[in-house]
Image: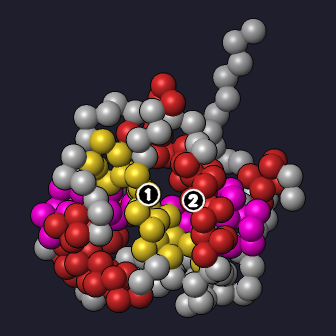
């Protein structure tokens, strides 16, 4: 698979087997993230890789409880509203029960924190597709970055108090044995040429 094919056929996979991919595959995905561009080549993105099922389950409960305590605001992103509603009704699924969660973080005071981490997450999703792994970018930990319970637990897993959570990636084998693939029709993302 060439690079453009890996980009064009990449889709978010949310239904995965419980089987943890071979560590070498996970390391290749992380390496793709670590090779992503960063402002002034600062390379500040921190990758916290969670494969321990008990830790994933405990984190899922903490996240669900954090969302259940929140009130929906009119100006909230629709997906965040959905997370709060699902948590309040007991139907919230944090990480789609994927066997691997890669949390990205960066320095709170670094102005390119989100951009650098976004590049890393995209690289990892493309690499996962190339390696026949399913992947999906998830944002609940970013949305809950200021929640004391979530932060306290993440700090026990290696998050520094000086860091902000910038995103997350779930990773695993697709439920059907391969990742979700297929080119999609571009319906948005306008392009303006100035020649």
Residue 99 point in image, percent of width and height = 51, 82
In the image: residue 4, left or right of residue 47: right
Residue 129 covered by magenta stretch: yes
Name the image quarter holding residue 92. Answer: bottom left
Name the image quarter holding residue 153. Answer: bottom left
Residue 194 point in image, percent of width and height = 69, 12
Assign the N terminus to one quadrant of the image: bottom right
Q: Which of 3 and 65 is in front in this view?
A: 3
Q: Nearer the viewer, residue 145 or 64?
A: 145
Q: Which is nearer the N-term, disc 1 or disc 2?
A: 2
| Residue neighbourhood size for the residue with mark 1, other residues' Cα within 10 Å, grouped as few (<14), some (14–19), many (≥20) | many
Q: Which residue is drawn at 80% across and 49% down?
A: 3
In the image: residue 71, left or right of residue 52: left
Name the residue beneath numbered marker 2: 30
Name the image quarter holding residue 56. Answer: bottom left
Q: Which region shows up in magenta?
A: 125-151
Q: Is mark 2 on a helix, strand or loop?
A: helix
In the image: residue 162, left or right of residue 121: left
Q: Residue 47 carries which label?
A: 1
Residue 11 point in image, percent of width and height = 67, 64
Q: How far apart are marks 1 and 2 (CA)?
A: 8 Å
| Residue neighbourhood size for the residue with mark 2, other residues' Cα within 10 Å, grouped as few (<14), some (14–19), many (≥20) | many
Vertical position of residue 29 compared to residue 96: above or below: above
Vertical position of residue 94 compared to residue 6: above or below: below
Residue 128 point in image, percent of width and height = 67, 64
Vertical position of residue 36 compared to residue 173: above or below: above
Assign the C terminus to one quadrant of the image: top right
Q: Which residue is drawn at 25% across and 34% down?
A: 109
Kindly check if marks 1 and 2 are in contact, taking CB atoms under 8 A apart as contact.
yes
Q: Residue furthest top?
A: 195
């Amino acid at each position: 698979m060439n690079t453009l094919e890996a980009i064009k056929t990449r889709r978010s996979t949310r239904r995965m087997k419980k089987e943890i991919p071979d560590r070498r595959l996970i390391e290749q995905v992380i390496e793709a993230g670590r090779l992503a561009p960063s402002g002034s080549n600062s390379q500040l993105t921190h990758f916290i890789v969670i494969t321990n099922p008990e830790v994933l389950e405990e984190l899922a409960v903490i996240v669900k409880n954090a969302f259940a305590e929140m009130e929906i605001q009119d100006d909230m992103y629709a997906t965040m509203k959905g997370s709060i509603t699902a948590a309040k009704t007991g139907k919230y699924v944090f990480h789609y029960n994927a066997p691997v969660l890669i949390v990205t973080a960066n320095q709170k005071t670094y102005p390119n924190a989100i951009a650098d981490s976004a590049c890393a997450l995209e690289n990892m999703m493309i690499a996962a597709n190339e390696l026949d792994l399913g992947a999906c970018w998830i944002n609940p930990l970013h949305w809950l970055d200021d929640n004391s319970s979530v932060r306290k637990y993440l700090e026990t897993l290696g998050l520094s108090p000086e860091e902000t959570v910038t995103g997350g990636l779930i990773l695993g084998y697709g439920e059907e044995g391969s990742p979700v693939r297929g080119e999609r029709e571009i319906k948005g993302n306008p392009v303006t040429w100035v020649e």
